[in-house]
Image (cartoon, coloured by chain):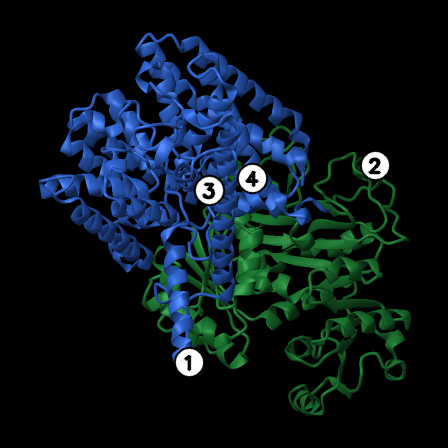
Amino acid sequence: MNIALVLNFVGIVLIFVSTFMLLPILISIIYRGTDLIALAVSLFITLFTGIMLHLLTRAHKDVELKHRDGFAIVTISWLTVSFFGSLPFIISGSIPSFTDAYFEAMSGFTTTGASILTDVEALPKGILFWRSLTHWMAGMGIIVLSLAILPMLGAGGMQLFKAEVPEIGVVEKLRPRIADTAKALWYIYTAITIIGVILLFLGGMNLYDALCHSFGAVATGGFSIKNTSIAHYQSAYIDIVITLLMLTGGVNFSLHFYAFRGDFSRYWKSGEFRFFCFIVSLSILLITLNMMGPNYTSPFDALRYAAFQAVSIVTATGYVTADFEKWPVLSQMLLVSLMFFGGMVGSTAGGMKQVRVLLMFRQAYRELYQLIHPHAVTYVKLDGKPLTKEVLDGIWGFIFLFLSVYVIGVLIMSSLGVDIITSATTVISAMSNIGPALGAAGPMENYSTIPLAGKWVLILCMLIGRLEVYTVIIFLVPHFWRK
Amino acid sequence: MRVIIVGAGEVGYQIAKFLCAEGIDVVVVDKDKGKLNRIAEELDVATIEGEGGDPSALKEAEADRADILLAVTNSDETNMIACLLAKAMFNIPRKIARIRTPDYFYNKSLLSKENLDINPAISPELEVAKAIIRLLEIPFAADVEDFEDGTVKVIGFKVTGKAHLIGKSLKELGTTTHQKFLIGLIEREDKTIIPSGSDVIMEGDIIYLPMKRAELMDEAAFLGVSTKPAKKIMILGGGRVGYYIASTLEGKADIKIIEKDAGRCEYLSKYLGKSLILRGDGVDQKLLLEENIDDMDVFVAVSNNEELNIMASLLAKKLGAGKSITIVNKTDYIPLAYSLGLQAVLSPRLITASSILRYVRRGDILSLTEIAEGKAEIIEARVGKTSLLIGKALKDKRLPKNSLIGTIIRGEEIIIPSGRDIVLRGDKLIIFALREAIKEVEKILQ
């Protein structure tokens, strides 16, 4: 691993993050908040560190980027960015404990949306805006953003891109150049966010609320600036708009890319999209039927809350409009199952991703088929194309590692004295970057009661989940450290 | 600009690498996943898995948005189909293809605008043969590139032990000789230099000089070598390359061809009336001596076996041949072969890539020629109407770092410039540049 090269790039990422801090500063000035100095100091520290790192390691710029450097750059960037992102919380005194502040920042950057704050509304507006902005900056990937703006890496950029947005062999490059691909993704992402702001603004939110919630929904983050999340607004229109924004964020952005170019047929041609629609519709239908009567008398209400919650969980956003812990057990179990699924690959959502589940399902079906026709030559296909054994092996490996990390996480959590429901659901909620879980960290509670060590376990789970396991776990492989 | 390359072999790779560095969007189509992976790992290009002759693969490559299609697979048929599809379905304005088979290559109507519309077709063997013939006309050169129909030549010259240039800086040389000369590039073992007056020439350097054809004699005198074109040539390998060379030079030079295959020998002796066809092995010392290898001006090794070519060239040199020209396919072998003491080592793939690239031109750039294994380029360009260079003496308006004007072509007049010469509107320039400087050179020309 080339430490100088890694730090050099981390420096650049920090410089980017610091420029984003100008936005909450602007908000703070507009609202005459008490957090102005804290934000300005954070910006200065981040910018200074970034520039120093970049300048001190300059000489090593021409060296070629290797695969492992790519992994190191991405993981270390995310760890560092979360540290500097937590500065505004600490300096302003909003979240005095370092662990809590780091948890909140990591939760923001990994678009988890799990919070340790009990009274969100008490925080100054600038700080809250920063909290929502962390979602938006990282939703499409911090590194991807850097690549879009700095086309300096050429083919090396592909290593970084792959480390941050694992492609699993079925995602194509949208444009011949990596920098152009990153740019295209960011244009679409920004456009969808702006549409979201306008729609929410029309629904009666003020501009500030609309921005924060559009960030949270399109990035499938889940931080709200209200204590009761989206339930605060008590508006069916807002529920529907947010549901649609979350769904959009959970769809592969390359499909949006073609749609923006006028080719809408790609949506339905994508097997993963059809599967995603199927899973989401089926869950909504089951939960709605399950809740009709005991929980909601009107079918429209049942559908509205069921749809919002199912979409919020499957896209790993984590906004809530209802206390789903009061829902029937089947509905709760369905939501927990959806936590594992996650959104589509190439989206801002977390989880194991729909395409992996779909392909494993097809693989399992093929095994059965071969038992019946032992001489049959069959392939697992996606969108009509046969997949190579390497791709399928990669998916098996991913699913095994994901579930292993999950089991180990749950074991550690329960060893810390956390109850079984809370352990079992907070770990998957963190790994899939969702936010709310069940039990002590349910939709109406928060993570403040989790023990200190448990918070660090969850911080790690969020990062592992966001970077799709391989990029972080690879540091534990001894071969990574050998020359 | 968007270019689609069909074929991810060595030629496709070299072209993609070059175009990508130029800031052109490149999409590579090939059916071999392994080759595509190698390209995607190393270059910032898009890759599509599929047959070049498959419309859906080209569609996936968004061929309708492409400006140029380069078909460089090993198969003529695939290349032609790709070009045909590009014409019929995607309306790509320019199609360039590698065409090997002479029956296709020389079929004017097949390739014409009405039919395949391939412009131009590049025959790798013919390009290699042409490069070798250029070298045979100027035997002391390690590399020769022609411009303006050969009236301007850029010559690569390997500085060997006895040359009087060694140890002198360019400034010194300028004062000690009364001849006008210009060195555009120095290729040294570990680096490639666009020289300034203080650079010193060392033994083993390959220096590139632009020169007028008419002044070849003077230049040769300056370099301390003789200019006589090769009169006695022995060619190892009677394949297409060997055949092309022999058929072009027959009558102008005495040619002996060594070929192992009996059938091929028969074919050669049928169509090459004046050449001597020998059936035998290129590393057969007896055969070489018997055929007076020590009397040969040049030994040309163009068989299909690159290791054999290298060994035979070494042997020929040891036995007293004047000069050797050696063909190797693997680019990694080129520096190795030079370090063994061979004088001119050519790679057919680099030559093919380079001759295709000459036609991928944009705006004021008329052609780009790779030299020094692709580390540097010769840019042939027209001076734009608003170029910053116009009206300035070269010493006042410097080109970007790592680039240098080698020749000014003004109508019929050819100027090898000194610092006092002035660039005018409409001039054509021949510029030496390291790869990283090309973008800036383009900018200053416009």
Q: Nearer the viewer, mark 1 or mark 2?
A: 1
Q: Which chain is blue?
A: A
- Residue A118 to residue A443: above or below: above
Q: Amino acid at mark 3?
A: Gly
Q: Amino acid at mark 4?
A: Val
Q: Nearer the viewer, mark 2 or mark 4?
A: 4
Q: Amino acid at mark 2?
A: Glu
- Tell me, for residue A376, which label it has, or none: 1
Q: Nearer the viewer, mark 3 or mark 4?
A: 3
* Residues at marks 3 and 2, CA–CA distance in whole angstroms: 67 Å
* Residues at marks 3 and 4, CA–CA distance in whole angstroms: 47 Å
- Assess whether mark 1 and mark 3 are in contact (beta carbons under 8 angstroms): no
- Residue B304 to residue A449: above or below: below
Residue at mark 3 = A465
Q: Chain of mark 3?
A: A
Of label 2 and label 4, which has the lower sequence position?
Answer: 2
Q: Which chain is green?
A: B
Residue at mark 4 = B441
Residue at mark 2 = B172
Disc 4 packing (10 Å; few <14; some 14–19; many ≥20): many
